[in-house]
């Protein structure tokens, strides 16, 4: 039996602290760096600006929110992490991103000083989901990677669907307008 | 030191699973500890059932059923923490075991290629204790095989 040499220790002390927001999805706690959050809204407050979207093979995104010129794809946190369905009440709108995430609740803010890399044994999509894990008290909490909710490919797929729907909507609006003009002329 | 002398110095840790034993080279074993709190978070690596913290690091706990094809002994009494490596990747893995482990020396060890038997790639040899033949495993090869099967879709990701 041997003691692991210190160079194999995975703990990465950054020497600085990081503010994180702890949030809950289906009973599981996650952390996300506070600087990655643009705003936190209730699901009710954005429902008026949301429209449905359907992309084959991408069931975790069912809604898109138009806010000014910006589009946000709403990712269902349960579907993304493969957790049992829950009732999300909040939306985390991510900064510098087209992603908003449905979550159940915000637990609190915390300051962490330790971020441990995800062990190399993990080989699934969780390698993209998380920046690593941290300790909150005695609990191991995964620290979410803000750019891990949607891949570039998935964003491109969603962008193409939204663009196609916009074209259809504007063509429909144009045809409605010309019908109204024709009706006015004939009268 | 000759290869034979080196082999004689090698020892193996015998892991009692539910209905059989497997062996790991002793140099890959870190420690045997009483089972602590298994913590879980979402992931899709089927052979990992959770994580524990040991010596300041996060150690994945294996699902014995998935990895060794044995009845899952997550409710066992101990964790055997072992190091595995494959290529440039290395990590620790905690294996739930139901009893204390034994140490065996290499006198009865025979490498797999010496007896010409066809076995799984992760079985590097066998040990004979009495009537019992115990497979010596290379955890790195076992896990690499699992990871290959996940990548090719032969194994379903964890629910």
Image: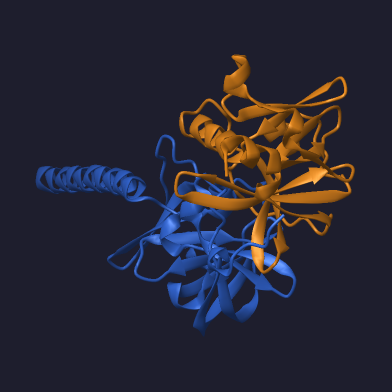
Q: Which chain is blue?
A: A
**Left or right: residue B78 compared with residue A78:** right
Question: Residue drawn 56% across and 48% down?
Answer: A122
The location of residue A49, given as percent across then percent down, is 42, 61
Question: Residue drawn 58% across and 43% down?
Answer: B44
Residue B69 visible, this orientation = no
**Left or right: residue B134 compared with residue A24:** right
> In the rendered view, would you say A171 is above or below B148?
below
Question: Residue drawn 79% across and 50% down?
Answer: B79
- Looking at the rendered image, the quarter that the N terminus of chain B falls into is top right
Please tell me which residue lies in front, A136 or B118: B118
Question: Residue drawn 36% across and 61% down?
Answer: A98
**Left or right: residue B149 compared with residue B83:** left
Please tell me which residue lies in front, A60 or A174: A60
> In the rendered view, would you say A96 is above or below B7?
below
Please tell me which residue lies in front, A19 or A79: A19
- Residue farthest to the left? A185
The location of residue B133, given as percent across then percent down, is 78, 23
> In the rendered view, would you say A111 is above or below B85?
below
Please tell me which residue lies in front, B106 or A117: B106
**Left or right: residue B34 compared with residue B13:** right
The location of residue A144, given as percent across then percent down, is 52, 63
Q: Which chain is orange?
A: B
Quadrant assignment, res B126: top right
Residue B143 visible, this orientation = yes
Instruction: Identify the image's colour scheme: rainbow, by chain, secondary structure or one colour.
Output: by chain
The location of residue B158, given as percent across then percent down, is 62, 39
């Amino acid at each position: 039996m041997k003691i692991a040499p210190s160079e194999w220790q995975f703990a990465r002390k950054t020497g600085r602290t990081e503010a994180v927001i702890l949030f809950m999805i289906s009973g599981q706690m996650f952390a996300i760096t506070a600087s990655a959050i643009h705003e936190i809204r209730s699901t009710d407050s954005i429902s008026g600006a949301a429209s449905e979207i359907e992309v084959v093979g991408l069931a975790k995104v069912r809604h898109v929110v138009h806010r000014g010129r910006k589009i946000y794809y709403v990712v269902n946190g349960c579907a993304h992490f493969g957790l049992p369905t829950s009732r999300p009440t909040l939306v985390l709108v991510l900064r510098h991103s087209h992603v908003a995430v449905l979550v159940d609740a915000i637990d609190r803010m915390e300051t962490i000083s330790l971020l441990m890399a995800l062990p190399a044994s993990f080989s699934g999509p969780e390698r993209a989901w998380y920046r690593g894990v941290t300790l909150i008290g005695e609990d191991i909490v995964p620290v979410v990677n803000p750019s891990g909710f949607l891949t570039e490919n998935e964003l491109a797929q969603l962008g193409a669907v939204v663009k196609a729907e916009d074209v259809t909507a504007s063509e429909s609006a144009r045809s409605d307008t010309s019908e109204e003009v024709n009706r006015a002329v004939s009268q | 030191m000759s290869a034979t002398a080196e082999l004689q110095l090698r020892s193996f840790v015998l892991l009692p699973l539910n209905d059989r034993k497997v062996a790991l080279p002793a140099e890959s074993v870190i420690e045997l500890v009483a089972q602590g709190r298994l913590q879980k978070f979402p992931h899709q690596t089927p052979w990992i059932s959770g994580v524990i913290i040991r010596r300041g690091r996060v150690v994945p706990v294996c699902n014995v059923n998935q990895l060794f094809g044995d009845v899952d002994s997550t409710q066992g009494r101990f964790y055997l923490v072992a190091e595995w490596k494959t290529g440039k990747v290395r990590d620790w893995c905690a294996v739930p075991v139901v009893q204390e482990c034994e140490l065996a020396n290499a006198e009865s060890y025979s490498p797999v290629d010496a007896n010409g038997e066809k076995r799984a790639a992760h079985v590097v040899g066998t040990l004979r204790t009495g009537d019992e033949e115990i497979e010596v495993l290379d955890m790195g090869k076992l896990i690499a095989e699992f990871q290959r099967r996940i990548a090719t879709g032969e194994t379903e990701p964890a629910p």
